[in-house]
Amino acid sequence: MLPVVHFKAQYAAHRMLMITTHMLLIFSLVYLIFYVVPQQRLRVWRTDAHFRLQFKSNRFDYAVNSPPAGYCDDAKVVVLIPSRASFGGLDARLAMRDTWLKKENIPPGFYYKFVIGLPQHESPARLRKFQRMLKEEQDEFNDLVIYDLPDTYHNLFLKTGVLMQWQQRFCPSAQYLIKADDDTVIDLKRMSKQLDEWFSADAKVDPKMVWGKVLSNSTVIRNKDDKWYLPTSKYDKEKYPKYTNGAIYILTTPAVQAILNVTHTSEDIFLEDVFFTGILRERANVSIVDVETFYPEYWFHNYCEENIPILAGLYGVSANSIPPLYRSLLSIDCSKLDGNSSGYVYVNRGS
């Protein structure tokens, strides 16, 4: 027979083990209910189209929701908008839908979608709320491409790869892909005229083209404390190739295909504009053209050419500023210019 002291000690240890086991089970159940299950719910409309992004040392398998069959068979231009997986992203999307993405402001042959990944670093309660909001938004507007990779700043290159692969899979007959962030404003009708009158001439010379605000001779940052630090293991040259500002740029469909065909030859780089329109573009022998079509400023001058305003898009725009800036963009009147060919027009934020 065990001494009473030993028996009590063993009983206490056994009781503590049982309590710990039950606490672990409860924690696991809570985690399953409040985190894993909500993440899986997002997969309800996402698991029907599967993709792989292959880079030199890493690969990323993911799934997205697919559009109906024949969704964009008559598409000339596909506008894909990387949007934040946050409540602020919703505000921007609502403002865009109410202005330049309104049905009456979209030219024939233009299609658009917002591209969104999985939110990160949210509490279970906020995550559930966000997922419900996203489901309701998709049910109402049906304009979201939702993929199941983490949506973070350092994963922006994945978002760009996702939207390029989505265009190639579902809208391969489109002539152009416009990538525009969710802080942009674009006059799509003006953009359509520019594509027909100007950009198409470039594409006839070289079918593989990218247009945007081109940056040249940019030095690779090696300071580890810098936001844009890049180690030599990712890219060992001292200068980046020419690339476009990532807020808005345009590619021909052959250019998109060529860029995706060489992703496996390079280490993945989080600087998505440098990576896709610079490093991969250069490897894919895609031509790049600097255009004055897109500006980052709220206050700017603009000129016309052949009765068409040069300015077609703005970036770095808050959700609240989208409506007045869109009105300002539309207000440019080439007829006010002498000779109606070139000159300056002052455009402001409006009211």
Image (cartoon, grey):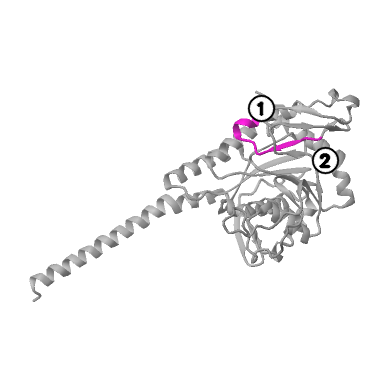
| Placement of 237 over or under 292, stated as above or below | below
Q: Amino acid at mark 1?
A: Pro
Q: Closest to the observer: 5 or 110?
A: 5
Query: x%, y% of residue 160?
Result: 66, 52
* Crowd tier of the residue under label 2, counting other residues whose Cα lies within 10 Å: few below 14, some 14–19, many 20 or above: some
Residue 242 visible in the snapshot: yes
| Placement of 340 over or under 257, stated as above or below | above
What secondary structure is marked by label 2?
helix
Give residue 20's mark. none
Which residue is denoted by mark 2 in the rendering?
195
Which residue is denoted by mark 1 in the rendering?
324
The residue segment tinted magenta is: 310-324
Residue 174 visible in the snapshot: no
Q: Closest to the observer: 17 or 58?
A: 58
Q: Amino acid at mark 2?
A: Leu
4 left or right, relative to 150: left
Mark 2 against mark 1, which lies toward the viewer? 1
Q: Residue at x 76, y 51 (%)?
A: 172
Q: Residue furthest bottom?
A: 1
What secondary structure is marked by label 1?
helix
Residue 200 lies in quadrant: top right
Which of the marked residues, 2 or 1, is nearer the chain's N terminus? 2
Residue 181 lies in quadrant: top right
Query: x%, y% of residue 267?
Result: 66, 64
Quarter of the image with the C terminus is: top right
Query: x%, y% of residue 265?
Result: 71, 66
